[in-house]
Image (cartoon, rainbow, N blue to C red):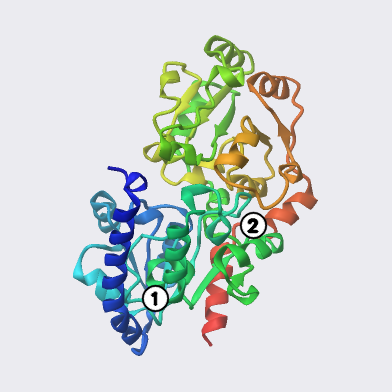
């Protein structure tokens, strides 16, 4: 049975049992904070411990290449990732091993992109650098009152207990937590989302965006350019909707949004476009029914070496409310926005920090408008002012600045 469907008395008993066990662990958590940490031992993880990507990966590889004096260890729950990293000369440890617990107890710094990547109960006294996974248009962290049933009394009570006492439950509760920003514009949102003072939000940019400028060859992009000479490669990356958790995933390729497979195919052919569709990982099954169309390529994590290196080599981005918009505009390439379900999204998935109209770029409410925008070429890279507003610190040197800032703070 789904946890959300459990009877109220079962939820209460279950939560009381968890609180009892957490209370027993509380002295151990505080005791860990009394021990001196190894400042030259840093541990990294990303996306619930299941992926090797995002800012954690880019900074991990930067450190391995440029600062071998720092021992960097990747923690993962995924055996395939552990095997791959070890074969490539990196130190990688299973989250479930006792050694991972020892590392979290000794590490001077911890880098992550989300909660639930590994147990933080032994990490009191470490510096936690929450790299997150993008700048917020949609409300996140403590500000998110729409998704996951945040409005229930039991949920709010649980959050308050964790924040006050059981801080290891989330990076957001840890006292020695820091995060990064792409520009000064986002600081006020990150403050409330993660309950952080301004000085804990570092203006260095996001390490993952350095890969947008790395230009390492991606085999799929090379193959497409050979097969379709002179084509425009368009990457479509919509964000996820919380409706997927209730069995109602968002499908952009639906008739409700004016989609017709034959019309779509004719358009791609006429405009010499190859569309690469990268859904959020919770929506991976959507769009695969179009895989027979040779100019429509469904991609997942196996289709590229590194997502942002891959994204940096396409000609245009299509998205809706995804944070990739704020990253991709640093490339000075155009973005076309597809807010097909804006009103519904705001009601059922996430509220926004600011009006969507403030986002610069050609916007299409359905597929017909999208076709017209590309046919008329009524799109362009965003203005210099918009890049400064949203992507001021994204220039391919974010890892270098983060390292320098860490060194400055540790003096």
Q: How many numbered discs, if any?
A: 2
Of all residues, the one furthest to the left in this rendering is 98
**Is there any visible trace of residue 317 in the rendered image?**
no
Q: What SS does tag 2 mark?
A: loop
Which label belongs to residue 395?
A: 2
**Residue, x 67% and y 18% (percent of image)?**
368
Q: Would you name the residue on which mark 1 appears?
A: 70
Name above or below for residue 242 compared with residue 197. above
**Label 2: few (<14), some (14–19) or many (≥20) C-alpha neighbours in 10 Å:** some
Q: Is residue 397 left or right of residue 111?
A: right
Looking at the image, which is closer to me, 77 or 52?
77
Distance in Å between CA atoms under marks 1 and 2? 25 Å
Quarter-of-image position of residue 358: top right
Instruction: Answer with left or right where residue 382 lies relative to residue 103.
Output: right
Closest to the observer: 347 or 192?
347
The one of 236 and 258 positioned closer to us in this rendering:
258
Between discs 1 and 2, the one toward the N terminus: 1
Coordinates of residue 349 in the picture (x, y in percent) = 55, 42
Disc 1 crowd rating (10 Å Cα; few below 14, some 14-19, many 20+) is few
Q: Is residue 342 left or right of residue 403?
A: right
Q: Residue at x 72, y 24 (%)?
A: 373
Which quadrant of the structure image shows residue 381?
top right
Work out whether 118 lies above or below 371. below
Q: Is residue 358 visible?
A: yes
**Which residue occupies the extreme front position in the image?**
9
- Helix, strand or loop for disc 1: loop
Rendered location of residue 304, percent (x, y): 42, 40
Dot label at residue 26: none
- The quadrant of the rendering that contains the N terminus is top left
Q: Residue at x 55, y 33 (%)?
A: 236
| On screen, residue 398 above or below 32 | above
């Amino acid at each position: 049975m789904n946890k959300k469907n459990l009877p109220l008395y079962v939820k209460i008993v279950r939560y009381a049992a968890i609180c009892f066990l957490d209370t027993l662990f509380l002295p151990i958590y505080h005791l860990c904070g009394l021990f001196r940490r190894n400042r030259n031992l840093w541990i990294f993880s990303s996306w619930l411990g299941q992926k090797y990507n995002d800012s954690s990966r880019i900074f991990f590889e930067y450190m391995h290449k440029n600062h071998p004096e720092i021992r960097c260890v990747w923690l993962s729950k995924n055996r395939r990732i552990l095997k791959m990293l070890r074969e490539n000369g990196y130190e990688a440890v299973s989250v479930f091993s006792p050694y991972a617990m020892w590392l979290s107890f000794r590490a001077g710094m911890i880098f992550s992109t989300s909660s639930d990547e590994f147990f933080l109960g032994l990490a009191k006294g470490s510096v936690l650098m929450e790299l997150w996974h993008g700048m917020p248009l949609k409300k996140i962290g403590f500000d998110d009152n729409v998704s996951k049933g945040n409005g229930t009394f039991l949920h709010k009570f649980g959050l308050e207990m964790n924040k006050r006492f059981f801080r290891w439950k989330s990076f957001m509760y840890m006292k020695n937590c820091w995060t990064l920003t792409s520009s000064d514009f986002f600081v006020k949102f990150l403050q409330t989302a993660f309950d952080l003072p301004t000085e804990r939000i570092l203006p260095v940019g996001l390490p993952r965006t350095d890969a947008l400028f790395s230009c390492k060859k991606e085999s799929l992009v090379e193959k497409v350019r050979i097969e379709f000479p002179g084509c425009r490669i368009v990457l479509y990356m919509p964000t996820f909707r919380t409706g997927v958790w209730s069995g109602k995933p968002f499908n952009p390729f639906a008739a409700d949004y004016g989609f017709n497979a034959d019309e779509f195919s004719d358009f791609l052919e006429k405009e010499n476009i190859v569309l690469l569709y990268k859904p959020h990982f919770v929506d991976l099954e959507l769009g695969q029914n179009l895989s027979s169309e040779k100019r429509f390529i469904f991609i997942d994590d196996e289709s590229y070496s590194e997502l942002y290196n891959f994204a940096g080599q396409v000609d245009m981005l299509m998205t809706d409310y995804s944070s990739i918009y704020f990253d991709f505009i640093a490339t000075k390439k155009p973005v076309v926005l597809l807010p097909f379900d804006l009103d519904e999204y705001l009601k059922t998935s996430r509220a926004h920090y600011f009006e969507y109209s403030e986002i610069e770029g050609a916007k299409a409410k359905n597929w017909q408008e999208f076709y017209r925008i590309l046919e008329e070429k009524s799109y362009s890279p965003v203005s210099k002012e918009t890049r400064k507003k949203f992507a001021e610190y994204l220039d391919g040197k974010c890892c270098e600045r983060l390292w320098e800032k860490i060194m400055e703070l540790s003096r």
